[in-house]
Amino acid sequence: MKMIEKMQPRAGLRVLVTAGASGIGEAIASAFLETGAKVLICDIDEASLQRAELAYPGIQTVKADVASEADVARMLDLARERFGGLDVLVNNAGISGPTGAIDALELDEIRATLDINLLGQFLVVQKSAAMLRESDAGAIINVSSVAGRLGYGLRTPYAATKWGIVGLTQSLAKEMGPDGIRVNAILPGIVRGPRMENVIRSRAEAEGVSYADMEQQYLANISLRRMVDPEDIASMALFLCSPAGANISGQAISVCGNVETI
């Protein structure tokens, strides 16, 4: 195989992307579709799923909440029914969680962040493990964040889950490696898009500064002084599932322009 051919996944991979109807998840799903993969996405937003169906002919969709065991089981049953199995799991679903001092946070907001961001990844891996073991190209990509390697004041529930995802990834790599399944985490930095705009706006309000000033604070903490695009994350996902990434496992890989602090 020529080196250039090793740099992209083989055609026909069966891929599940959670929260795949917008943002990073949509970029990853679209990228896999371009390689000839069979792609199933889930999301909790029916309108976004309908839009994805129109934008990407052939994509499979299902409404599912990754924090719901019943929804996850139904989603994986659908993957078996539609694809006959699964080769790649992209655990992307997550929420930003609350912004504020630890003693000002509502317990239900903390629990929702833990359930969706961390428990959700546990559940999806648990329900998909048998299918991934049957694959000859099994791979799991858990989407964490640079907040999974750096402390993040005023965003403690979010940061705690993202550090947890790195621990989950490294543990699963050891557990599932003997079955030929590679497990890695991607740690996106400040990703351009509506979600990041909301994060910046919430933090600006919490600190009593303007949106423009807060945005500049974020950019000043990045060595390259720029945000990354969702497609940058998708490119790394493709590489990790390509023959060129065959011996990469247990890694937490930042795609962030070198975020120095947050």
Image: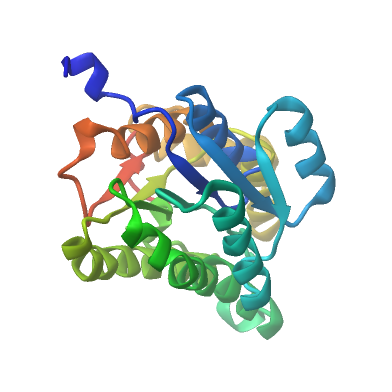
At 38% across and 48% down in the image, what residue appears? 187
Where is 51 relative to 47, above or below?
Answer: above
- Please indicate whether residue 182 sits to the left or right of residue 77 in the image: left
Where is 67 relative to 1, above or below?
Answer: below
* Image position, residue 65 (x, y; %): 68, 65
At 40% across and 29% down in the image, what residue appears? 235
Looking at the picture, tell me which residue is in the foreground, 61 or 65.
61
At 61% across and 43% down in the image, what residue appears? 196
Looking at the picture, tell me which residue is in the foreground, 153 or 56.
56
Looking at the picture, tell me which residue is in the foreground, 153 or 24.
24
* Image position, residue 234 (x, y; %): 45, 33
Residue 43 seen anywhere in this rendered image of the structure? yes
* Image position, residue 261 (x, y; %): 36, 50
At 23% across and 52% down in the image, what residue appears? 251
Looking at the picture, tell me which residue is in the foreground, 249 or 194.
249
Q: Residue furthest right?
A: 47
* Image position, residue 79 (x, y; %): 57, 54
- Give the color scheme: rainbow, by chain, secondary structure or one colour: rainbow
Where is 240 relative to 42, above or below?
Answer: above
The picture quadrant where one finds residue 13 is: top left
The picture quadrant where one finds residue 175 is: bottom left
Where is 44 relative to 51, above or below?
Answer: below
